Image (tube, grey):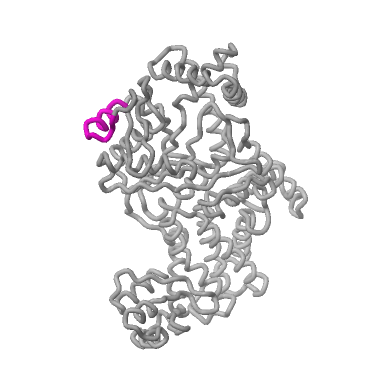
Amino acid sequence: MREILEEKLKEIFKEKDFKLEKAPEERGDYASGIAFRVAKEEKRDPKEVAKELKEKIGENTFFQTEVAGGFLNFSLTEEALWKEFFKLLKEKEDYGKKKGGKKAVIDYSSPNVAKSFGVGHLRSTIIGQSLYNIYDFLGWDVAGINHLGDWGTQYGKLIYQIKKEEKDPEKLSIKELEELYVRFHKDEEKYPELKEEGRKWFSKLEKGDPEARRIWEICKNKSLEEFDKIYKELEIEIDHTIGESFYEDKLSEVIKETKRKGVAKESKGALIIEFDDMPPAMILKSDGGTTYFTRDLAAIWHRIKEFSPDLIIYEIGADQSLHMKQLFAATEMLGWKKSTELIHVAHGMFRLKEGKFSTRKGKTVHLKEVLELAKEKAEEIIENSMTAGDLSSEEKKEIARIVGIGAVKYNDLKRYYKRDVLFDWEQVMQLKGDSGPYLQYACLRCKSVLEKGGKYEVKEEGLEKEERRVVKKIVRFKEVTEMAATSFSPNIIAEYAYDLAREYNVFYDNLPILGNEKRMAITEGVFIVLKRCLYLLTISLPSKM
């Protein structure tokens, strides 16, 4: 609705970039401060300018215009609301969906192998998948990439520790591999020379040493099995799983190009890229070994070549901000960007009260543990509910899985991605109030009303206050989805869905719905939009609650 109104006002004001803001609830639907700009240019009173602009807009059937101070406030007419609402009822789950968009690559999740899937990787996984769903819904041709951390000096360290302790890698669990990694770093604090041993083993790995390769392959395969279980539990499917090791045979070509274009230079036996306003980035160590930066550079080179994307989104933690700035700058220097936009969606970090998560220091919370506890808590609530006796044990477990995991996902997605999150078990497991289960329950309430009410026919007629409030919320869905995409912020959809669910619950409590065709239609509209919001937030809907 905002887009239609903006287009109408652009024609009137002859403004190419005319934008509206959401108005305070009691003042209308949208607002513009254009009168303040005009008044400043013409050195006049904004109130007088606003009155003149209102006269220029004139009367129409789409919106009503009011002046408040120097602001122009616009209220959508019932005719406009009904027109958009009928469109939603006709298009149903396709409402707001687009076709034939541009191409996007989204890099997300990206856990490190030989380590448990920590709760710290939840943010990248869930925010990334939500952005994938949003862009796909808006018609983009999207490719999701899980850029596994399966290469680098840390694997040299792990191989060294396995050899030192004479462990059989085939018999080691992910938990035990992680413990070996932690022990290496504890020893390294006492004996700094161990760092060189890790480098030596990674150098062997890069050069194809059979023993190093054998151990690495075993560790990698064990990790992939573990990750697949987590992704299945989260109902996450990523199009391409491409580890850092995939770029091994592409690194030499990328390094040659940095030299040929004069982007890289030698420094103390190493090869580096210098920047005007940042520290240099190393792409080749003095011992000939490559770096994380080299592999990320090769990944961009490959993605541009393979997918020809208009946009590459990196959903990676804010602690990698400098690295990403260097990477994007190097890509620009190499002339690779051309028509491809690079965006770093730098999410805030999950932190413990004592500081940030750190696998090497043994400070982490395993996501598997979080998900299990969420399901257990949901199952306890189901067991104590009035409907528990109507459910089989299998149904209870499945509902608990969907509700518990939905709660964990929503707890993350409702937050603005840039903010750090203090890890708190009570918050993570929240099942009431502004929570995933609250949305799931509201959606199922609508479904139940529709099943009880049966078929209906609706025609345009006057809207009561509560009805109008809900319909206005419903028809904002398209603009909310667009806003979430352009700002890379799924929390905008989460906030909107919660507001809509809350508004509908007030509507449900105050007005009789069954037998009233207009209110049945409004209920269907809420159901369509809430269900779509849950999908965009990667949250499933249980069969019952």
Q: Which residue sits at x=59%, y=40%? A: 356
Left or right: 268, with 518 as reference point: left
- Pick the front one: 36 or 26: 36
Residue 393 in which image quadrant: top right
What residue appears at the point 36 percent right and 22 percent down from the top-left corner? 286
Q: In x, y percent, where is residue 287?
A: 37, 19
Quarter of the rendering containing residue 183: top right
Q: Image check: 32 left or right of 379?
A: left
| Nearest the eye: 442 or 278 | 278
In this view, the residue farthest toward the left is 260
Residue at x 44%, y 60% (from the top left corner): 483
Q: Nearer the viewer, residue 84 or 74?
A: 74
Query: 10 or 179: nearer the eye?
Result: 179
| Rendering coords of residue 297 (x, y %) | 34, 35
Find residue 487 and report its horizontal and vertical position in percent.
43, 56
Q: Is residue 209 magenta?
A: no
Q: How many marks?
A: 0
Q: Is residue 486 above or below residue 163?
A: below
Instruction: Establish if 119 lies above or below 112.
Output: below
Q: Main secondary structure of the magenta part?
A: helix
Residue 255 on the magenta span:
yes
Question: Which stretch is magenta?
Answer: 250-265
Classify the position of the N terminus by image quarter.
bottom left
Place of residue 499 in the rendered image (x, y in percent of width and height, measured from the top left): 58, 65
> Which residue is situated farthest in the front direction here?
268
- Residue 149 visible here: yes
Residue drawn at x 51%, y 79% as measured from the top left: 27
Task: Evaluate whether residue 399 shows in this view.
Answer: no
